[in-house]
Amino acid sequence: MKVSKEAIKAIIMRSIALVAFLSISYWLLCPSGFIAQLLKVDISFLFLPILISSIVFYLSAVVNAIYASKVMGIANSALRGLAIALVMYLIAMQWAFGIWTSIIFWVFIIALTAIFDHVVNSLANLYNEPLLSILSTAISLFLVGLSFSKIMASFLSYPPSPLKAFPDVVFWTFTIVAAISLLSIFKYFSNPYLRVLGTKVGSNVVGMTALMFLVLMYFFALRPQIIGYPIPIPISLIEWGIICLSIWLFYRSLKGQVNSYLTEPLEMGDWAKLVQEIEHRIDPEQVSLADLIREFIDCGVKDGVITRLVAIMLLNGLSEESIRKIVRKILEYQDLPYPRIRLTQWVKGIDEENKRRRKNLLKMLLDEIKQEMRSAELHRLFKAGQVEVKMEGREIGPL
């Protein structure tokens, strides 16, 4: 690896600046330094945080000058965040006493967890590894729950009876939600029920946390208080009724979302044949897109369907601006990429999702072409029929 002269010059200048800054800081902050003699106050404890943060920022700048990349950008942001968190922790610990020592420590753990989650999610997005993001979310939820429970336990050293279980409720709430969040891996599976379940879990972490907190608060704190009261219906029967009702409602919601998810592809059919019929007064012809549509839907090949769509638009007198706008959309379309860790179920799920997205794109483009034809009042030159989708042995009707 060859280092440029500009990078060497930048490193030398930063090194000189670092040495000068640390020397002045030590002269000002040391026990017998300028500030101690002037103000009669010992603030030498500030030198260690300044030393650590300065070195971290210096190393980050040096590495960035030598080797600039997205990975190094993520590493640099993580190092800077770590330096800031560590400096604040060391300064806060100088004045901490009693329970505040434990509280500040667990707040520091939460800050480290946030940095960890940011780094892992950034790497997962960079290398298209969704499994890393899912595992990072689960680990982060567990660590945050553990930290919050320890902080609450420190505050509630001698809590009243209803609040005694509060730290345990917080810990188990985040732990259970962390385990449930792993189900979001199902959104990369081909089974529609598993895919919808994984999507709902991944997008409702906050809601699940709130719901789980209320449920556990009931069982840990409220239920022991009311179980002794005489009521006409046994409390266990009411609980089982609520559980069964919740499961039934969840199943209905899941089934409804799966049906709505499957409706659109079924309406589009399997694209065995797509026919665009145009009656032109000068040169009438029938354009068949079956093979080109199948090639684009199944394999993502764009050139054939672009050529035929352009021919249709030119034949019908669409303006150059309209043609460019429509062609640009299909050129800019990109499939969902495969992750580097390729599980069979993930690949099948991504393939099906890409086919569905291509179908939707073609339907949107054909609708736009028809709209452009209507808005331009081209019926004076030709009469455009409806775009129809035909399946093997069955006609679906107009799009």
Image (cartoon, rainbow, N blue to C red):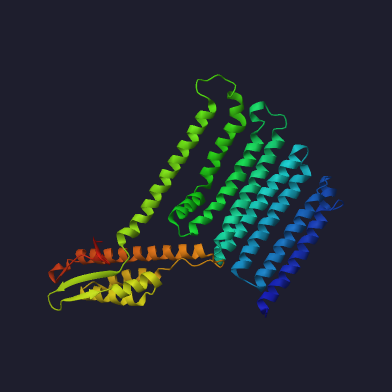
Depicted 71 relative to depicted 135: above or below: below
Q: Is residue 90 left or right of residue 276?
A: right
Residue farthest toward the right in the current orientation of the protein: 32
User: Which residue is depicted at the point 60% across and 41% down?
Assistant: 173
Name the spot of residue 227 as percent of width and height, x first: 58, 24
Q: Is residue 139 left or right of residue 287?
A: right
User: Which residue is depicted at the point 56% across and 63% down?
Assistant: 129
Name the spot of residue 294 as percent of width and height, x first: 34, 72
Task: Report which quarter residue 74 is drawn in.
Answer: bottom right
Q: Which of the two residues, 59 or 398, is positioned nearer the viewer here?
A: 398
User: Which residue is depicted at the point 37% across and 51% down?
Assistant: 259
User: Which residue is depicted at the point 43% across and 55% down?
Assistant: 192
Task: Report which quarter residue 373 is drawn in.
Answer: bottom left
Depicted 306 relative to depicted 109: above or below: below
Depicted 275 relative to depicted 160: above or below: below
Residue farthest toward the bottom in the current orientation of the protein: 2
Q: Which of the two residues, 144 or 295, is positioned nearer the viewer here?
A: 295
Q: Is residue 390 left or right of residue 2?
A: left
Name the spot of residue 34 as percent of width and height, x first: 83, 52
Quarter of the picture holding the N terminus: bottom right
Name the spot of residue 147 as percent of width and height, x first: 67, 44
